Structures are given as structure tokens and as C-alpha cells.
Amino acid sequence: MRLVSYNIQYGKGKDGRFDLARICAALQGADIIALQEVERHWPRSGDVDQPAQIAALLGQGYHWVYGAGFDVDAGHLPPEPTGSPRRRQFGNMLLSRWPILSSRHHLLPKMGLTRHFSLQRSVIEGVIAPPDGPALRVHSLHLSHVGDGDRAPQVERLLQLHREAPLEGGAWCGTHAETAWTLGLPPPPMPAAAVWMGDFNLAPDSPLYTRLTGPWSPDFGRMSHLGGLVDAFVAAGGAERDPADWTCDSCEPPQPRRRIDHCLVSTELAPRVRRAWIDQEAQGSDHQPLWVEMG
């Protein structure tokens, strides 16, 4: 099973050209895809419906869901042919070769800032059941770009979601449900096994990375606890802080190239990680795709 996370910067490449086909070409061969900075009806990207275009470019082999954190009226555009007003949206997308059994959209805490641009961030979650293994929760997320002070409550929310999701049950659960709700099907699962992929906007030297992946032991390395999260890139043999392993080269304010896009897996999934790599050749965004292969 191959997973990839890619902040596509709404299709704007390193050459300043908007090209979703170039984005999709870099995703070939993926079974599960987590995208960030996917937008709808923005003048800067041609007022197009990017989730629909990406799904069309990748072909009919993918199921997909989209969640917009930033969602405002697109008053600069005429209504849809049906008469419905259009929305100007910016968020995350999740695609899978296998059915997405259920999905939830989680808004993250937002700090109301006065001197810096701040926007609503979110997580799109999908429960996916690969044909050769048990179901797992997969998330595409994007944390605040401003600083750890803004990201800290968002990280706490991620950890809360990770802990509590299995206790909440699937999209529906319990007994005596009418067939009109269930269609005679069993309740969809809400497994503990989870993958969190996306633009965390924080590097391994951040205290929030430690909050997510566990404290550091000089003798034994990262101390992952039961029920916690493991950096798949490190589980595959990568170094936490190798400057050669970077996923973004144009962060604001200008900073050195850093690995700020991550794939974190629950501890029970960590032994299944076989390989992880960063596609440094991709030119479609200011970020690089992060790939993880799991057995």
C-alpha cells in the first residue's frame, strides 16, 4: 500500500505556472492520497473547482472527499447553472483506490490574530478498508503557518481526535436503527489504527513534534508510547533532522529548507512501514510529495 501527502499550493508550481495535470502526474501509483491547499472558485487559480478537476485527471479509479476550512461566499462569480450560489473554498482532499467507508470534517482551533494573517484550518478524515488488511482511519490535514503558539492547540486537538475516535464509533452505531438509515448494512468501523498526513508546518526540532511523537531518550531515541504516533519517515530508516530531507523550500518568513510535511502512524501500524521517501523532482508546488509504503 502506497500513501502520499502533497501540499499542492493550489496548483502553483515553482515556475509560477498553475498546472493541476503536473500535480496529478506526480501522484501516479499512489493508493491513498492526502492533498492540502486545494481550492474552489478562486480568481488566482482560474475560478475552477480544483477537487473535481483533480478527481477527473486521476481517473475513475479513485474515491474522494474534500473538506474546506476556509469557506466564504464567491460573490465575484455567477451562480451555478442550478441557481445555487458558489462558494470560495480552501482546504484538504483525500483520495483512495478503495471505498471511503465514512468521512468526517474536523475544524481545528483558530487564534484570532491582529497583526498576522490567520485562516481556519481543518482535517478531512476517511475510514478506508484495503482489500488485504483491516480498516484504518486516514487524515489529510494542514496546521497553522503562523507559529507554534497558534499550532499548539491544534496539535492538542489532533491528539484528542486520535484518542477518542474509536470510542465515538462509526458514522452510526448502536441498535434498533431503522433500515432507512442503515440500508440493512452493518455499522461502518471507526478503527484505532490511524494515519495522519499533511502539512504540519513544523519541523522535528519543534517541541510540538515531540508532543506528537513522544519524548526523546539520549540512550534509546524517540519514546513512542502505546496508543501514540510514530513518524513513518523515521520508522522507515530516515533521520529526524537530516537537512537533506526537506519538503518545503519557500516557507514564510524565509527559512532554510525543512521537513514540515509528515506522515504519522499509530504505533500498531509502525511495524508495517517498509519505505518512505521525498520526491525532490516534483515541480508542481512549493512543497514536495512525501511517500510512504506500508506492508
Image (spheres, rainbow, N blue to C red):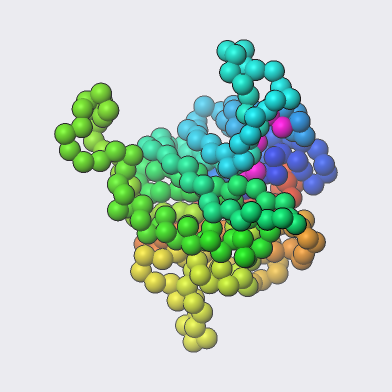
- Asked if residue 291 is positioned above or below residue 50 in the image, the reply reads below
- Asked if residue 217 is positioned above or below residue 118 in the image, the reply reads below
- Asked if residue 257 is positioned above or below residue 179 in the image, the reply reads below
Q: What residue is at 38 percent from the left and 49 percent from the top?
A: 136
Find the residue positioned furthest to the bottom.
Answer: 219
- Asked if residue 55 is positioned above or below residue 149 in the image, the reply reads above
Q: Position of residue 208 (x, y in %)?
A: 56, 68
How many labels were placed on the picture? 0
234 or 254, which lies in front?
A: 254
Q: Is residue 135 left or right of residue 152?
A: left
Q: Position of residue 127 (x, y in %)?
A: 39, 43
Q: Position of residue 262 (x, y in %)?
A: 57, 58
Q: Is residue 255 left or right of residue 179?
A: right
Q: What residue is at 71 percent from the left and 22 percent from the top?
A: 77
Q: Is residue 265 left or right of residue 14?
A: left
Q: Main secondary structure of the magenta part?
A: strand
Q: What residue is at 62 percent from the left and 41 percent from the top?
A: 70
Highlighted magenta segment, given as a residue range: 36-42
123 or 277, which lies in front?
A: 123
Q: Position of residue 164 (x, y in %)?
A: 35, 56
Q: What residue is at 48 percent from the left and 62 percent from the top?
A: 156
- Quarter holding the C terminus is bottom left
The quadrant holding residue 80 is top right
* Residue 140 sits inside the magenta stretch: no
The answer to whether residue 28 is seen in the rendering is no
262 or 144, which lies in front?
A: 144
The answer to whether residue 218 is seen in the rendering is yes
Find the residue positioned furthest to the right.
Answer: 15
